[in-house]
Image (cartoon, rainbow, N blue to C red):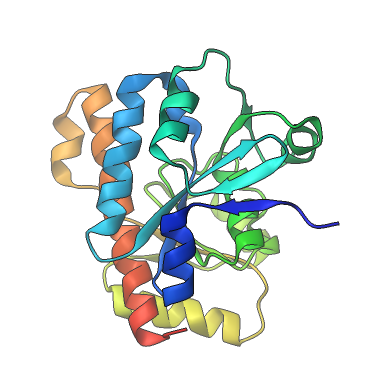
């Protein structure tokens, strides 16, 4: 059985052209129109370095790899859109449901879609790191015991070229799983209000992820 994957036009063109693509969870859209704007700013931050964002969603038994503007509005404005983590994904797909994705389900989707990078501000449900060859850029450090138990490396993105080489070396050594990268959070975030701070963290992390994906694509063109 193959899981149906529907690529947005922008993402499909990027993959064909060999451009770097960064997957993003869609769970932020469940909070309403204001957070839909945060999601748009996050996508724009990925584009700063020439990478292409692919916000992941679930709809009618399919995984959407890249959401359209109408998808953004629908996910943000429809009351009661559920959130599906990795463990919820099989049931959501089997039911033909519409669901926003968390970090873990986006990781699964990115692996299925052949995407090498995932950006997620939160890491709370990242429990499938050993199963998918996807580099995860996040704002917070995941549980270190979890990373060690799964053999997943951790690095700070101080030097994107060096980290890109480390990621590729990890996979070249035969490791099947993820590589976790933490993004430095801008100092201004610490003194900002909660909503503003959350948006700044998401946007800042996305910009780091886009830059890392672009550096990887330059070092290892497809």
Residue displayed at 58% across by 21% down:
81
> What is the quadrant of residue 94 in the picture?
top right
Where residue 86 sits: x, y (%)? 69, 42
Residue at 49% over, 62% down? 12
Q: Residue at x 33, y 72 (%)?
A: 214
Compare residues 155 and 41 and report the one nearer the observer: 41
Q: On the rendered structure, is 121 left or right of 147?
A: left
Decide if residue 130 is on the left or right side of residue 32.
Answer: right
Say if residue 40 shows up in the picture. yes
Using the image as rendered, state which of residue 91 and residue 202 is in the foreground: 91
- Please provide percent x and percent y for residue 127: 65, 48
With respect to residue 209, does 41 lie above or below? above
Q: How many marks?
A: 0
Q: Position of residue 107 (x, y in %)?
A: 59, 53
Q: Position of residue 212 (x, y in %)?
A: 34, 68
Q: Is 13 situated above or below 24?
A: below
What residue lies at 44% left-to-right and 66% top-to-bottom? 13
In which quarter of the view is residue 88 placed? top right
């Amino acid at each position: 059985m193959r899981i149906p994957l529907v690529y947005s036009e922008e993402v499909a063109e990027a993959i064909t052209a060999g451009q770097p693509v960064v997957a993003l969870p869609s769970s932020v859209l469940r909070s309403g129109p204001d957070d839909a704007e945060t999601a748009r700013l996050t996508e724009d931050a990925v584009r700063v370095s020439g990478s292409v964002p692919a916000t992941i969603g679930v709809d009618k038994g399919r995984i959407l790899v890249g959401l359209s503007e109408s998808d953004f509005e629908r996910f943000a404005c429809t009351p009661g859109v559920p959130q599906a983590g990795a463990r919820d994904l099989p049931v959501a797909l089997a039911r033909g449901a519409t669901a926003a994705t968390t970090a873990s389900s986006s990781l699964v989707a990115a692996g299925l879609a052949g995407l090498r990078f995932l950006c997620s501000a939160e890491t709370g449900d990242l429990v499938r790191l050993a199963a998918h060859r996807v580099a995860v850029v996040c704002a917070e450090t995941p549980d270190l015991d979890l990373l060690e138990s799964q053999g997943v490396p951790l690095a700070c993105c101080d030097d994107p070229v060096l980290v890109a080489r480390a990621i590729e070396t990890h996979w070249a050594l035969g490791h099947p799983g993820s590589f976790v990268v933490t993004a430095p959070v801008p100092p201004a975030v610490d003194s900002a209000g909660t909503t503003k701070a959350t948006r700044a963290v998401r946007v800042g992390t996305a910009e780091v992820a886009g830059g890392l994906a672009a550096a990887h694509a330059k070092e290892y063109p497809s």
